[in-house]
Image (spheres, helix red, strand yellow):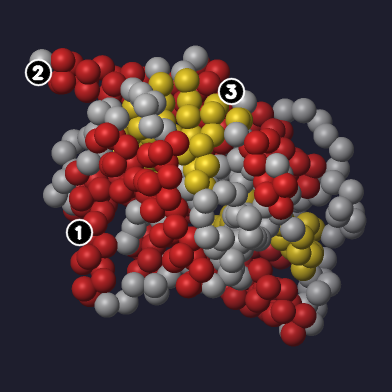
């Protein structure tokens, strides 16, 4: 089967779509990815890409078509330009580069911006093939939660756009059951939705690797956060929790933060301003395949989200990743994400924004027996292999791809 994957983000950026493309190639499909120039999360086009663009035209058997985009940088104006430039160039430059190519199905990996659905609708139409849309970031709900959309007419306009995009989808996949339920509010949804979560990364943790030399080993309880450092992750309340513990003269812990994002510089400045440097260590992004070596330093892994309706509907991708690592999880999070941690018995959770609750969890876990922490971590690993197995989920997706293609072919073969 010839599959066109549309995603604004792709290797060398670290996203699940990279593995998805690799797995579909392994199954035997011919995979082409339509994507932009890599610039996430730093906001600048990767220097290694600019030095040798040809090096990034293929990924583990999948062909890559790249279109120029405006780098996202670190402000809202540039981010809007980044989104718009991908939308326009994916259609116009993408059309030119894919001219004459035939596909059996279009598969869209939808993070922000959801306007990527316009691109997928366009290629589904001109290539006369079905459109499968995987929602990992629910619009306009996320924009409302981040206070980007404030006026009623803006919200209605985006809901109208999303309804139109959904009407052009043959199949819609939702990363959580809450998002699946929310989709029922759109008139264009016609019994064509499926629950399809992200998977764990268990294969990254199978082989023993050397501990990351970038981090100095210390005899303190080590909490690690890996991923995007943005508005949604609610670092102000993480800082408040640490500040609260410092006032009580509790010093037997540290929080290591690995990643990048719009709030990273603010975070570093705030840590310095409040004189909390001994509690925090902030590092740059590292390739996904190196994360196990960093996790070997961790006694617990931290996940946080602000208390907004859309975030309560979301399972952050890092939760599956954390579960597979077999390390206890600390969550300051509500909704679907909290349910997974509680159900898997893989850690301890307090509500979003509850920095007092977070501080109590940190203190309690820092006093726990190492054997008990290992047991909690193993609970998560077992749960991930049962509920978020990559092999099972990719097999499920493959069946959806084949069924959707056949249904489309049967529909149009009648004419």
Q: Position of residue 253 (x, y in %)?
A: 79, 64
Q: Secondary structure at mark 3?
A: loop
Which mark lies nearer to you, 2 or 1?
2
The picture quadrant where one finds residue 313 is bottom left
Residue 381's x, y, as percent?
62, 35
Above or below 176: residue 128: above
Q: Position of residue 301 (x, y in %)?
A: 67, 52
Q: Are marks 2 and 1 in contact (CB under 8 Å)?
A: no
Residue ID at (41%, 21%) = 2
In the rendered structure, the answer to whether residue 321 lies left or right of residue 393 reads right
Is 307 left or right of 350, judged from the image as shown?
Answer: left
Mark toward the start of the polypeptide (3 vs 1): 3
Where residue 238 sits: x, y (%)?
63, 70
The reply to whether the C-beta atoms of the residues labelled 3 and 1 are less than 8 Å apart is: no
User: Front-most of 234 and 87?
Assistant: 87
Can residue 408 be seen here? yes
**Residue sitting at x 65%, y 76%:** 266
SS at badge 1: helix
Give the foreground label among 3 and 1.
3
Q: Which residue is mark 3?
A: 61
Point out which mark residue 160 bears.
1
Disc 3 crowd rating (10 Å Cα; few below 14, some 14-19, many 20+) is some
Image quadrant containing the N terminus:
top left
Q: Name the N-terminal-most of marks 2 and 1.
A: 1
| CA gap, disc 2 and disc 1 | 31 Å
Q: Residues within 10 Å of mark 1 (few under 14, many from 20)?
A: some
**Label disc, if present, on residue 415 of the rendered structure:** 2
C-alpha gap between disc 3 and disc 1? 38 Å
């Amino acid at each position: 089967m010839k599959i066109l994957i549309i995603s604004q983000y792709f290797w060398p950026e670290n996203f699940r779509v990279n593995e998805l493309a690799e797995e579909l190639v392994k199954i035997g499909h011919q995979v082409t990815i339509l994507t932009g120039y890599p610039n996430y999360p730093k906001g600048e086009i990767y220097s290694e890409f600019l030095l040798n663009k040809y090096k990034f035209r293929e990924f583990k058997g999948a062909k890559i078509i790249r279109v120029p985009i405006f780098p996202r940088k670190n402000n809202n104006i540039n981010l809007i330009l980044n989104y718009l430039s991908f939308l326009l160039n994916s259609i116009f430059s993408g059309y030119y580069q894919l001219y004459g190519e035939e596909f059996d199905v279009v598969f869209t990996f939808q993070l922000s911006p959801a306007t990527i659905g316009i691109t997928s609708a366009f290629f589904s139409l001109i290539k006369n093939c079905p459109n499968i849309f995987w929602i990992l970031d629910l619009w306009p709900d996320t924009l409302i939660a981040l206070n980007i959309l404030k006026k009623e007419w803006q919200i209605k306009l985006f809901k109208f756009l999303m309804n139109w995009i959904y009407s052009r989808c043959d199949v819609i996949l939702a990363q959580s059951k809450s998002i699946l339920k929310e989709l029922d509010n759109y008139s264009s949804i016609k019994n064509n939705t499926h629950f399809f979560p992200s998977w764990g990364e268990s294969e990254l943790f199978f082989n023993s690797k050397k501990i990351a030399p970038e981090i100095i080993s210390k005899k303190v309880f080590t909490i690690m956060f890996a991923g995007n450092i943005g508005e949604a992750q609610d670092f102000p309340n993480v800082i408040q929790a640490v500040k609260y513990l410092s006032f009580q003269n509790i010093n037997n812990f540290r929080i290591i933060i690995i990643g990048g994002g719009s709030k990273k510089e603010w975070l570093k400045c705030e840590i310095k301003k409040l004189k909390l440097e001994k509690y925090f260590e902030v590092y740059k992004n590292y390739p996904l395949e190196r994360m196990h070596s960093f996790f070997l330093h961790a006694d617990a892994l931290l996940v946080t989200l602000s208390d907004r309706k859309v975030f309560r509907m979301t399972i952050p991708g890092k939760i599956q990743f954390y579960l597979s690592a077999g390390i206890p999880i600390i969550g300051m999070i509500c909704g679907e994400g909290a349910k997974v941690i509680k159900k898997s018995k893989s850690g301890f959770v307090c509500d979003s924004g509850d920095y007092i609750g977070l501080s109590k969890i940190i203190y309690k876990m820092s006093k726990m027996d190492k054997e008990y922490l290992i047991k909690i971590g193993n609970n998560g690993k077992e749960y991930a292999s049962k509920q978020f197995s990559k092999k099972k989920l990719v097999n499920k997706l493959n069946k959806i791809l084949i069924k959707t293609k056949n249904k489309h072919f049967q529909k149009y073969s009648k004419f």
